[in-house]
């Protein structure tokens, strides 16, 4: 394999490893990909001189930046990207909590242990709540004792 082919192979392998970092997090593949790109530039400088090495460096830099921008805009819209990326949880009705209003005196159930704060289900809605004083276990019945702006204060139902 000649120097030209080695430069092309190093550049392609570098870009592929960096792209694979999306699917295998941990920075190992990304770092190896970066080393491959650096190796391609070094090989160009060593085999073809200063001018060719500078062109390879500039070309790889431009391709990297353009590729990154395209990746950032295109990837979330691909089937794999939609599967990997976080979705808005409130659209599906699952996961998120709602802003609580008019809950004073209502009853519900703690969904998480309330070690001062956590999540409860009150009238079918998931609400971020704060325990008045005691620790409340998940599954315990609770009562809303007051609302302070965005804060919903609860106590264990006796």
Image (cartoon, rainbow, N blue to C red):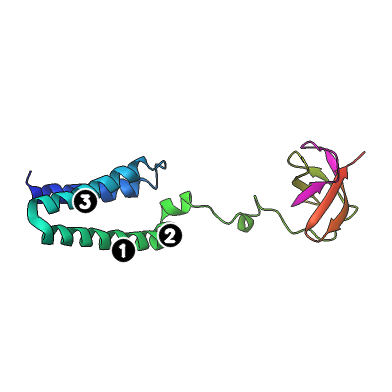
Q: Mark 1: give few (<14), some (14-19) or many (20+) Cα within 10 Å.
A: few
- What residue is rendered at 13% in x and 53% in y? 44
Q: Position of residue 82 (x, y in %)?
A: 46, 54
Which quadrant is the C terminus positioned in? Answer: top right
Per the image, label 1 sits on a secondary structure element best described as helix
Q: Mark 3: give few (<14), some (14-19) or many (20+) Cα within 10 Å.
A: many
Task: Examine the image and state in which quarter residue 146 appears.
Answer: bottom right
Q: Which residues are magenta?
A: 125-142
Q: Nearer the viewer, residue 83 or 71?
A: 71
Residue at image mark 3: 11
- Compared across the picture, whether 27 is left or right of 47 comes to right
Q: Is residue 136 magenta?
A: yes
Residue at image mark 1: 66
Q: Position of residue 62 (x, y in %)?
A: 26, 63
Residue at image mark 2: 77
Q: Is residue 35 visible?
A: yes
Per the image, label 2 sits on a secondary structure element best described as helix
């Amino acid at each position: 394999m000649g120097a030209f082919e080695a430069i092309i192979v190093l550049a392609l392998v570098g870009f592929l490893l960096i792209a694979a970092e999306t699917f295998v997090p941990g920075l190992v593949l990304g770092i190896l990909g970066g080393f491959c790109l650096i190796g391609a530039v070094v090989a160009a400088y060593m085999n073809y001189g200063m001018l060719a090495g500078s062109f390879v460096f500039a070309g790889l830099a431009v391709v990297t930046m353009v590729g990154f921008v395209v990746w950032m805009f295109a990837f979330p819209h691909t089937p794999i990207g939609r599967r990997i990326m976080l979705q808005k949880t409130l659209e599906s009705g699952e996961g998120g909590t709602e802003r609580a209003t008019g809950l004073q005196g209502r009853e519900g159930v703690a969904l998480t242990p309330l070690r001062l704060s956590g999540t409860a289900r009150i009238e079918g809605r998931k609400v971020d709540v704060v325990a008045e004083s005691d620790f409340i276990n998940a599954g315990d019945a609770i009562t809303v004792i007051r609302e302070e702006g965005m804060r919903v204060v609860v106590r264990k139902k006796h």
